[in-house]
Amino acid sequence: MSTVAVVGAGAMGEAIVSGMLARGWLPDDLVLAVRRPEHAEALRASYGVEVTDAVTAAAKADVVLVGVKPYDVHDVLTQIGPRLRPGALVVSLAVGLTTARLESALPAGTPVVRVMPNTPAQVGAGVSVISAGSTCDDAKLDVVDEIMSAVGAVVRVPERLQDAAGAISGSGPAYVFLAIEALIEAGVHLGLPRATSAELAVQTFVGASRLAAETGDHPAVLRERVTSPGGTTAAALSVLEDRGVRAAFLAATRAARDRSAEIGG
Ligand SMILES: NC(=O)C1=CN([C@@H]2O[C@H](COP(=O)(O)OP(=O)(O)OC[C@H]3O[C@@H](n4cnc5c(N)ncnc54)[C@H](O)[C@@H]3O)[C@@H](O)[C@H]2O)C=CC1
Ligand SMILES: O=C(O)[C@@H]1CCC=N1
């Protein structure tokens, strides 16, 4: 098994670490790097993994996952580049940054993979969108597929689709959490105790998502099965359509896609 360094084990990096450990990777397979000493201590206590600085972590690894914010990626790559093991693979989780840009900050020929993961990785239910850089062969891309498969589904796309994919699945959990939050609050407004409303809302998202995933039926068909003619669901859906929910999703995901391209420069 490869040694995997996670440089920048923040919200996303830690979700992947936690998911990998829950699915059979060993603490000795991982080495992490974060900036703040108290954060390092918390990660050691939670996961029993080594936590060190970026360069030391990268120098020990066959695969380096870079989980820092996009504007910190260039500095991290220029620091770790000279200390990478021969043939080490660099995997970026950063939104927007192209493999060409990543490659230009690393020693010539360093294989690079761009990944757009999402936070449900923490419970093994993530989805990661992966694309290879110019010198990354299929065997290296398979290694990333194997790592990210430990925390959910993996989808390979041509890199030109990464900004769009990020707008759907990378940011997507936030849209779902907003919807859950709104549904809970709506239940409270209708007089449900908050805990009851929360249980109903969360379980409804879990159940509806599983139904869509496990049947493979089109969501429009599943929606029709809930919607009795002249019934309560029809009354609710007509309000959501009037308020432009579909148009809001179109505009929101375009904004995310465009912001990703802008971050990528
Ligand atoms: N949060 C999310 O849902 C997703 C995030 N991403 C990408 O993941 C990356 C990280 O995002 P988040 O986890 O949300 O950010 P975050 O701010 O939670 O985590 C970044 C971590 O990197 C650490 N860090 C920064 N510079 C460092 C250095 N030189 N050495 C060691 N550690 C360093 C920070 O201390 C922090 O712990 C971003 O590039 C983002 O585009 C991608 C998909 C989803
Ligand atoms: O909001 C962001 O920029 C990151 C990338 C995708 C999800 N979170």
Image (spheres, rainbow, N blue to C red):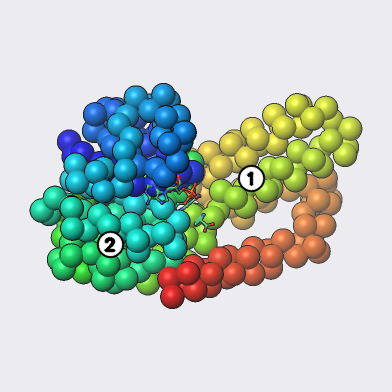
Upstream in the sequence, badge 2 or badge 1? Answer: 2
Q: Residue 254 falls in which quadrant of the image?
A: bottom right
Q: Is residue 244 above or below residue 223?
A: below
- Given residues 116 and 90, the one toward you in this image is 90
- Given residues 158 and 216, the one toward you in this image is 158
Find residue 114 and report its horizontal and vertical position in percent.
Answer: 33, 60
In the current view of this chain or complex, which residue is farthest to the front? 37
Q: Which residue is mark 1?
A: 177
Q: Is mark 1 within 8 Å of ligand 1?
A: no
Q: Is residue 60 above or below residue 42?
A: below
Q: Are marks 2 and 1 in contact (CB under 8 Å)?
A: no
Q: Secondary structure at mark 2?
A: helix
Label 1 sits on what residue type? Phe
Q: Which residue is mark 2?
A: 78
Measuring 39% from the left and 43% from the top, which residue is drawn there? 34
Q: Is residue 137 above or below residue 50?
A: below
Q: Is residue 23 above or below residue 53?
A: above
- Given residues 141 and 239, the one toward you in this image is 141
Left or right: residue 93 versus residue 261 is left
Measuring 45% from the left and 41% from the top, which residue is drawn there? 36
Measuring 32% from the left and 70% from the top, which residue is drawn there? 101
Task: State the CA–CA distance, disc 2 to disc 1.
Answer: 36 Å
Q: Residues within 10 Å of mark 2 (few under 14, many from 20)?
A: some
Q: Residues within 10 Å of mark 1 (few under 14, many from 20)?
A: few
Q: Is mark 2 within 8 Å of ligand 1?
A: no
